[in-house]
Amino acid sequence: MASIKPSVPKGTRDFSPAEMAKRNYIFDTIKSVFRKYGYQQIETPSMENLSTLMGKYGDEGDKLIFKVLDSGEYFEKTKISKYINQLIDDIACQREFQNQIINNVQDHNLIFLWPNIKEASLKQSDIEQQLISLLRNSLNSKELSQQISEKALRYDLTVPFARYVVQHQNEITFPFKRFQVQPVWRADRPQRGRYREFYQCDADVVGSDSLLNEAEFVMIYDEALGKLGLKDFTIKINNRKILSGIAEIIDKSDNIIDLTVAIDKLDKIGLDGVIKELLEKGFTQNDIEKIKPVILLEGSNEIKLRSLRSALIQSDIGLKGCDEIETVLDYVASFGLQVANLELDITLARGLNYYTGAIFEVKTNEVAMGSIGGGGRYDDLTGMFGLKGLTGVGISFGADRIYDVMEELNLFPAAANQSTKVLICCFDKEGEKYALPLLKQLRSNNINTELYPAGAKIKKQMEYANNKQIGYTIVIGSDEMQSGLLTFKDMASGLQEKLATEQIIGKLI
Amino acid sequence: MASIKPSVPKGTRDFSPAEMAKRNYIFDTIKSVFRKYGYQQIETPSMENLSTLMGKYGDEGDKLIFKVLDSGEYFEKTKISKYINQLIDDIACQREFQNQIINNVQDHNLIFLWPNIKEASLKQSDIEQQLISLLRNSLNSKELSQQISEKALRYDLTVPFARYVVQHQNEITFPFKRFQVQPVWRADRPQRGRYREFYQCDADVVGSDSLLNEAEFVMIYDEALGKLGLKDFTIKINNRKILSGIAEIIDKSDNIIDLTVAIDKLDKIGLDGVIKELLEKGFTQNDIEKIKPVILLEGSNEIKLRSLRSALIQSDIGLKGCDEIETVLDYVASFGLQVANLELDITLARGLNYYTGAIFEVKTNEVAMGSIGGGGRYDDLTGMFGLKGLTGVGISFGADRIYDVMEELNLFPAAANQSTKVLICCFDKEGEKYALPLLKQLRSNNINTELYPAGAKIKKQMEYANNKQIGYTIVIGSDEMQSGLLTFKDMASGLQEKLATEQIIGKLI
């Protein structure tokens, strides 16, 4: 055992103090903005009943759910185990018949028993065949999982939130504005930037259809990402009803998925690519002529909206979508954005099956990176748990990507390191004794302070301060103890001066 | 599905906004004290390799580890699956022989084949028996688990921390002071106060044998629990070396576990009970006479230490323990405790197999409750992962119990509710429009503010404020819009007055 270097499961990570400090900085910033807008934190258990999760993420999603093994003698209770034991008993029976047959053949005195033995043996064979066929049907992981696992690790925060709302509906005051920052687990193949355990950071409001909520989410993105130091990012907004309208005006409402999947690729494959794909999917040249102006919308959000309205004039739902977007834009305009660009983008379709109104996505323009946030309105989130007619809208921050963006742009402030502010260094036990009241005094002033235990070389103590990114050191030698003036060093600049305790406290507070 | 009320797995909990706010208050307070003493946060993955966890918690612990099912076609790869398939093939073979036998009996022309068939059949029987015996040995949950699960949920924070230190030893600057606040999972039978998912809150330092660390942990308990509002609690301290010394002076070093287990019960079963148990375990009347004065130590810590020293005069290790305790007490005295009582208690033995020096336990004297914290020094934490000779000392806060104590004593400050500070209420769309700049202005002043979307009755809006424990409301009606003086209500006192925006901001900042 001693020789095997320990490791973590693939796709999972340790977070060192330096990484944790940066992650805390991101989460604390986002949480404070959520709170400013009236969102309150909840937490749900890491494990949910398997029945709560299964069937909510499609077949592919079901496969990626980490299932937790039942505890105790779980296998002994399974059908497979029962069948196998029956089969083993059965084989013993069959062996008994076989022996009888063998004896029968050898001992012709028993020949009169032959028909009975034969019949019994064939009957036993039938039972055996039935058992084998039952076994064969059970002999696969999917079937077995249902018998040995009744809990699983949550796959996202949305389904547990829906479960929470339904379970606690009588305690909740609606509209219910909640945020949640917890890890989720997915048995995906790990790759760069894709982990099997990662934090999601969601805010949702359920029980209010006011578009003020949509506008406030735009403001939350603006404020939180702005506070984190991002200087150029775009919040894209669309509305499912506009997409429905586009499908409606070419009379292809049933093909809305094909339509939006194709349009969604405009950025990557260009207009020609989109048209090619649409033609392949059965859209006509005539359809394409009708929707081309919609796909190629340009100009300000106001101009785009005006063009959309005239293109969608025949579609009530399309116009409704335009109204909704306009209301959100008006709210946002009355608040005023600080950093973000807000852009109506009708090619945006993420999670289409799910969203019924607004759709959001956030991208930074400073670094090449996928979306760093997204969300939208869903009219029937809690329907899956039997509570109908509760509308909701929510957004998510992609914390890992935001971390990478901030790292690349060097946006983490030095103060975010959450490390010790000052290290007291001494040469010996005498110095340590001298240092104790100082240590106490600094901490009483709420200054994060450490005293390096006596006995180590000053060089080692300085290395400790450097590695831990401690801002300042105080050295206590015999001169210092005599004069009461302590050597105070700014570790960043290297400047050092002799100061009295009060002066040091003044500098550190 | 619609009719089944969704629930969480037994032993797990949802945390509502009110509970989360209180839990955050506890964790934030403890974390801030950890940081003040130079401890930095890390996080480790929820899942560890099964090999990292198994065998670290004893046989009972191993059973309580939640194992995570491998993903994909995990069962098809198991030995059980292989054996079953072979057995099924084998049964088909055997059936073939049986048919031959039956035919042979019926058709006497084939009688000359009889010996071959019989021999082959018996040989096949042997194979079958071997398969069955292999199967029987695999047909249990323990055996199967090893084949279908290679990951498990962490059981505590200590073993993952040891794994972390060994894995990252080349990046870490020692002494390494880390804290960690994360959930752990145990497949224990749930009962009042015992959960299958709960947070642990640990601080440890590895790579320093200075007793300053022990003293600082006493100070951390004092400061953190004091900040949380506890007014009467006791930090008990003992030292494994003193327990070793007591066993040594009666020449029963090999029976130290029996000895300490018995002494540990002094509180519950009294001296007579302890003596009875010791006699049952093979200690002599003479042994008991020798250690009785040690068990019954009374008086101040100084007096206890003096008595101990004279009782342990023959034991080097016992005296070493006394020296260590004295050093810790001296450090603590030089800092000065604010709230806690520090009490030398030689009956304290928790986790004896583990600890090698100091042992801590914290109890509140205000409420009947088990320990709310504990810890100690262990000389070989990382040895289990092959890194020898690294000493460590650590403590833990029992967050769930601290929560219950604070709830019972009503110690959570109102400000800890983390809710919205003020709710703006309006009657209609016109009021909402009037409210938007106000909403923006309040938030710009970092005041957590909500605007209730237009359309609801004021009564409902007030209920919302009450249920969410929002401190203040602002009502905007036609009078207010005309005069610019808004109705500002303190929800706790019920007092309301008409104020200009600037005055309201002055009251809320």
Image: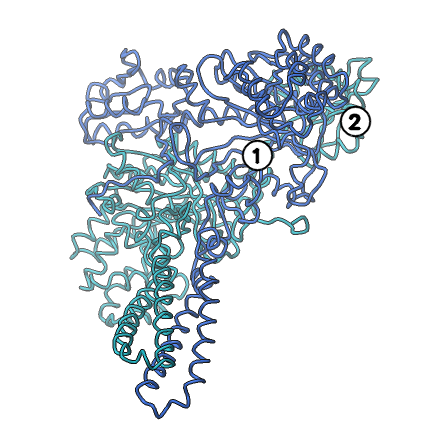
Chain colours: A blue, B cyan
Tell me what residue is drawn at x 63 percent, y 6 percent: A299
A260 horizontally vs B337: left or right: right
Can residue A183 be seen here? yes
Q: Looking at this view, is B378 or A435 the one in front? A: B378
Please tell me whether residue B321 is drawn above or below residue A76 in the rendered image.
above
Tag 2 subunit: B
Please tell me whether residue A410 is drawn above or below residue B194 in the rendered image.
above
B269 horizontally vs B124: left or right: right
Please tell me whether residue B83 is drawn above or below residue B408 in the rendered image.
below
Q: Looking at this view, is B389 or A81 the one in front? A: A81
Between marks 2 and 1, how big is the CA–CA gap? 26 Å
Disc 2 vs disc 1: Cβ atoms closer than 8 Å?
Answer: no
Quadrant into which the C terminus of chain B falls:
top right
Q: Position of residue A435 (x, y in %)?
A: 28, 27
Q: Which residue is mark 1?
A: A41
User: Label 2 amino acid?
Assistant: Gly
Does label 1 lie on the same chain as label 2? no
User: Label 1 amino acid?
Assistant: Gln
Tell me what residue is drawn at x 65 percent, y 43 percent: A166
For residue B413, what is the image quadrant? top right
Residue at the extreme bottom of the image, as rendered: A109
Q: Position of residue A380 (x, y in %)?
A: 67, 36
Check residue B455 in the rendering and tell me which mark sits there, or answer none.
2
